[in-house]
Amino acid sequence: VRPRSRSLSPGRSPSSYDNEIVMMNHVYKERFPKATAQMEEKLRDFTRAYEPDSVLPLADGVLSFIHHQIIELARDCLTKSRDGLITTVYFYELQENLEKLLQDAYERSESLEVAFVTQLVKKLLIIISRPARLLECLEFNPEEFYHLLEAAEGHAKEGHLVKTDIPRYIIRQLGLTRDPFPDVVHLEEQDSGGSNTPEQDDLSEVME
């Protein structure tokens, strides 16, 4: 289950939804200024260090194109962050796009250069993982989650599941069995040489 954009009700215009995104980003940057600044700085460094003009050109045409696409995704993320247009849905879509590019690299190329593309994807996922988790906590809507819970429970009962299976079914339907950014914590630890737990002030801010 992937987070979806909130549907627009009849009395809710696209412009009001855009304003919600801008306001949420304003709150996010106010509460987590360090996380935002670090992500933007790392995205700048990433694009400068790995843009096609800064590294040896890849001999494989497919991988060269994918390399270019990865850098463009990083630039777009930086622009969206600066403009206050980042959402949890955007982060999920970015992750999915990176996964698709990596899958294309493995399926369409047999070059050893695919290892370079793999490292680029891992580095970019590490950069966005912590801000994505913080923003997801900030965007959490208890009322919306309750409606999803009711719907999942209804589907479970309609399916005539055994009572003991209903909780498991609901958990699966709500997507609570899957880390939205799998393997990223492990990658962060490898990248930093140790554990990379969120700072205490971030944790306390989320809980407020």
Image (tube, grey):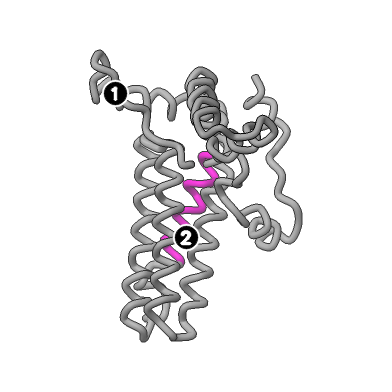
Q: Between 44 and 153, which is closer to the camera in this rendering?
A: 153
Q: Between 121 and 37, which is closer to the camera in this rendering?
A: 121
Corner quadrant of residue 3? top left
Residue 140 appearing in the image: no
Amino acid identity at mark 2:
Phe
Residue on which disc 2 sits: 46
Q: What residue do we see at 60% from left, 46% from top?
A: 178
Corner quadrant of residue 86? top left
Most extreme residue toward the top, as rendered? 11
Residue on which disc 1 sits: 8
| Range covered by the magenta-colored residues | 36-49
- Left or right of residue 15: residue 131: right
User: Residue 181: where, in percent of width, then height?
Assistant: 56, 50
Q: Is residue 95 above or below residue 62?
A: above
Q: What residue do we see at 34% from left, 37% from top?
A: 83
The reply to whether dot 1 and dot 2 touch (C-beta < 8 Å) is no
Amino acid identity at mark 1:
Leu
- Left or right of residue 159: residue 20: left
- Left or right of residue 174: residue 165: right
Q: Between 15 and 22, which is closer to the camera in this rendering?
A: 15
Q: What residue do we see at 36% from left, 70% from top?
A: 66
Q: Residues within 10 Å of mark 1 (few under 14, many from 20)?
A: few
* Sequence-first tag of 1 and 2: 1
User: Residue 84: where, in percent of width, then height?
Assistant: 38, 34
